[in-house]
Image (tube, grey):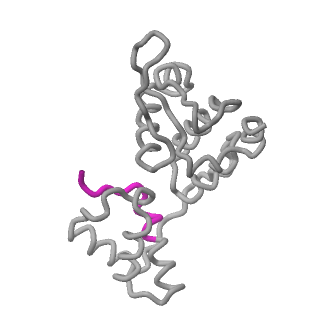
Amino acid sequence: MSFKWNNRKKATETAIKLKKEEGLSPEEAVKKVLAEYEGIYFVNGKDISEVRYNNFIKRVEEEKQYKQPTTTSTNLDLKHKKLVEFVENGVLTELQAKVLDDVFKNLEGFKIEESGVEIESFVKESQYKPLQVKIALRNLEKKGFIFIKELEGDSEERSEYIFVQTSKQNLFNSKSLEKVTK
């Protein structure tokens, strides 16, 4: 696989912040972002081309200012409110947050680490277009929020299931987790 940005804007803003706060050179700030934000702002950081790498350094050097979005994501109607912060920080798109929120809703009342959501039925029941949901799920998997595993179902057919990564279970509302642990 080759290098790909998930959020170039946030990567640049983070490197500029590191440059200012830690007194790093633009190149040192870029190296630090590439070392610490794999899977969040980009994928396959070690495969970044020389041109992209130099452009990244140039944006940090010039302290590139991006336009603020015209819409605010704080109005997102999500049951699991911690996801809003990921949208505001540019880690997730609004659609990804809404799909992840729906996954969480489907898992409420189950042991999260032992239960998954069957993809086919999840996609059919979603309010979004099937392709949108599948793309959002694959991106959530790339970003380390979920993993998808093929399992044998009741009818001995194999199906794909969505599971929440253990490290992301803290994004559930605490009341949702309390139901499971009691």
- Residue 46 relative to residue 114: left or right: left
Task: Give the residue drawn at x 52%, y 45%.
Answer: 165
In the image, farthest residue toward the top = 155
Is residue 118 positioned above or below 45 on the image?
above
Q: Locate residue 141, reporting x and y percent.
A: 44, 43
Q: Toward the viewer: 104 or 163?
A: 163
Queried whether the magenta region covers residue 7, the answer comes back as: yes
In the image, farthest residue toward the left = 50
Tally of numbered discs: 0
Extent of the magenta region: 1-12
Q: Locate residue 24, reporting x and y percent.
A: 43, 87
Queried whether the magenta region covers residue 144, the answer comes back as: no
Residue 94 lies in what quarter of the image?
Answer: top right
Q: Locate residue 125, reporting x and y percent.
A: 56, 20
Task: Give the residue drawn at x 52%, y 50%.
Answer: 92
Q: Toward the viewer: 111 or 148?
A: 111
Is residue 79 positioned above or below 152 on the image?
below
Task: Give the residue drawn at x 72%, y 41%.
Answer: 177
Q: Toward the viewer: 33 or 11?
A: 33
Q: Toward the viewer: 169 or 121?
A: 169
Q: Locate residue 37, reporting x and y percent.
A: 44, 64
- Residue 59 relative to residue 78: left or right: left
Q: Quadrant of the C terminus?
A: top right
Residue 117 lies in what quarter of the image?
Answer: top right
Is residue 121 positioned above or below 128 on the image?
above
Task: Give the residue drawn at x 27%, y 65%.
Answer: 46
Is residue 22 positioned above or below 139 on the image?
below
